[in-house]
Amino acid sequence: MDTAKALKQSPLFADFSNREIDSVVETARERSFAKGEKIIEEGAEGGRAFYVLLDGSAQARKGDTALADFTPGDYFGEMALLLEDTPRTADVVATSDVHCLLITSWDLRALIKVHPHAGDKIMAELATRFHNNLMAELDSRLRSSDPAPGD
């Protein structure tokens, strides 16, 4: 598998130069999970890392409720970087055999030392995603609290 090519599919790394991508690949660790295995466990402490899905598929779940489906290029668990020492908020389960890149906060710090603009790119993408997720959640709550017309 060409890890660098797979990373370029991710919105988190789409604007990275080849040198920046190579630095990520050199620093981060590849992990594999079998179908049905938990990649992230809800409530787990100390998750100062996130994952980029390189191959396979996974699903975020809260109990029996599916929250999101992930395919190659998607990333998840990034809130652990923004809210350090906060328990994981959902399970992420491999729905097929999965190959991921595990990126820790230390990996990002090392990357930013060598490529300072990489941090700006990552934070811009994370801020956009956080905003979009927040807006979707607010919209969902407003829709569920609005009475139906004529009520």
Image (cartoon, grey):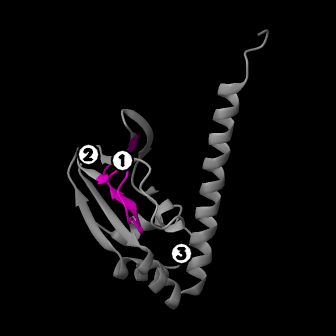
The crowd level at tag 2 (other Cα within 10 Å; few <14, some 14-19, many 20+) is some
Residue 58 in the image, given as x and y percentages of width and height: 34, 47
Q: Is residue 64 visible?
A: yes
Residue 129 in the image, given as x and y percentages of width and height: 60, 56
Specify the amino acid type for callout 1.
Asp
Q: Residue at x 33, y 52 (%)?
A: 41
Q: Which residues are magenta?
A: 39-61
Camera-side residue of 75 and 1: 75
Earlier along the polypeptide chain: callout 1 or callout 2? 1
Specify the quadrant of the image occupied by residue 116.
bottom right
Image quarter in which the C terminus is found: top right
Disc 1, SS:
strand
Q: Residue at x 64, y 34 (%)?
A: 140
Residue 36, compared with residue 108, is above or below; it is above
Q: Is residue 9 visible?
A: no
The residue that mark 3 highlights is 16
Image quarter in which the N terminus is found: bottom left
Specify the amino acid type for callout 3.
Phe
Residue 94, compared with residue 30, is above or below; it is above
Please tell me whether mark 1 or mark 2 is closer to you in this view.
1
Disc 2, SS:
loop
